[in-house]
């Protein structure tokens, strides 16, 4: 008797993903299928737990099991690489998972946790500026390092944990810079809306000088902050960002 291998494979995968809604494939012992299912699910569950430790910690075992099981059953990953499953999990939270009324910040928290892993394995190798670049940053042409990500969240994700689970977003969002240093260590730095906008201007305007980036920012902020104060603040900020490798020489990208 001929066997339809595609159909058999689909039955096999269907049971492994969702044993509650798919029968055990024909001619396969239930005990064996249960072992296969446990092995596959435990791999995914372990990977999610290690990449989203805060999210795992703020959920009880039943909540987490339900979340991981639903992801495993419903989401069709577009990659075979384990290192990219965390990004697939974000896609699932954004497009397939209903908003959790008890954890309305879930997607932002998961993204915040994913960023650390994504930056830690990023392949970019930017050349950082030297002491002269830092000292003369106003005259230098700047770029945002590919290993520095300015981020804004509606919830204060950097504070969330078992003892702090906000139910509503505060009036002011949280501005962060996540970057990888020359020792390949990932850092999270809270910043201001002004610095966030300055980095946006540098990123949007290729080869812009430090001086021009501050003038552009001052033009935008003229009704909110004194221009002279902003220029003084801006120089210190640019030098600090250059020391950390968040901004780099444009030619080094």
Image (cartoon, rainbow, N blue to C red):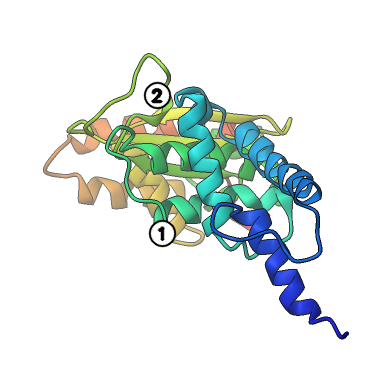
Nearest the viewer among 6 and 120 is 6
Disc nearer the start of the sequence (2/1): 1
Dot 2: what SS?
loop
Residue 126 is situated, as x and y percent measured from the top left of the image, at 69, 48
Answer with the quarter of the image where residue 18 lies: bottom right
Category of crowding for the residue at label 2, using alpha-carbon neighbours closer than 10 angstroms: few (below 14), some (14–19), many (at least 20): some
Most distant residue in the top direction: 163
- Give me the residue at 16% from left, 44% from top: 222
| Residue at image point 56% right, 55% down | 73
The answer to whether 60 appears left or right of 25 in the picture is left
Q: Which residue bears the numbered disc 2?
A: 160
Please state the horizontal and vertical placement of residue 199, each as a whole percent of the image. 42, 46
Residue to which mark 1 is pinned? 95
Tag on residue 249?
Answer: none
195 lies above or below 77: above
Most distant residue in the bottom direction: 2
In the image, residue 35 sits, relative to residue 7, either above or below, namely above
What is the distance, in whole Å, between disc 2 and disc 1 at their CAs?
A: 23 Å
- Tell which of 71 and 243 is nearer to you: 71
- Crowd band around label 1 with a 10 angstrom C-alpha radius: few (<14), some (14–19), many (20+): few
**Where's the C terminus, which quadrant?**
bottom right
The answer to whether residue 123 shows anywhere in this view is no
Q: Residue at x 58, y 31 (%)?
A: 244
**Looking at the image, residue 6 lies above or below residue 99:** below
Of 130 and 8, nearer the camera is 8
Asked whether, in this view, residue 144 is left or right of residue 165, the answer is right
């Amino acid at each position: 008797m001929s066997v339809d291998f595609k159909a058999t494979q689909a039955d096999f995968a269907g049971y492994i993903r969702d044993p509650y809604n798919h029968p055990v494939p024909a001619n396969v012992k239930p005990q064996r299928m249960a072992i296969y299912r446990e092995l596959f699910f435990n791999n995914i569950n372990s990977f999610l737990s290690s990449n989203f430790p805060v999210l795992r910690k703020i959920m009880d075992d039943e909540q987490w099991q339900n979340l991981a099981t639903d992801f495993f059953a419903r989401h069709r990953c577009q990659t075979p690489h384990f290192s990219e499953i965390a990004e697939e999990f974000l896609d699932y939270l954004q497009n397939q998972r209903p908003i959790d009324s008890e954890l309305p910040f879930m997607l932002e928290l998961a993204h915040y946790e994913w960023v650390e892993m994504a930056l830690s394995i990023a392949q970019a190798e930017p050349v950082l500026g030297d002491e002269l670049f830092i000292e003369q940053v106003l005259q230098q042409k700047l770029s945002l390092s590919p290993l520095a990500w300015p981020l804004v969240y509606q919830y204060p994700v950097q504070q969330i944990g078992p003892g702090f689970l906000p139910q509503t977003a505060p009036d002011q969002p949280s501005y962060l810079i996540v970057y990888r240093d020359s020792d390949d260590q990932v850092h999270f730095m809270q910043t201001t809306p002004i610095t966030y906008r300055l980095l946006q201007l540098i990123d949007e305007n290729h080869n812009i000088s430090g001086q021009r980036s501050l003038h552009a920012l001052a033009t935008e902020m003229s009704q909110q902050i004194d221009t002279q104060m902003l220029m003084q603040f801006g120089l210190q900020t640019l030098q600090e960002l250059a020391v950390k490798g968040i901004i780099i020489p444009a030619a080094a990208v």
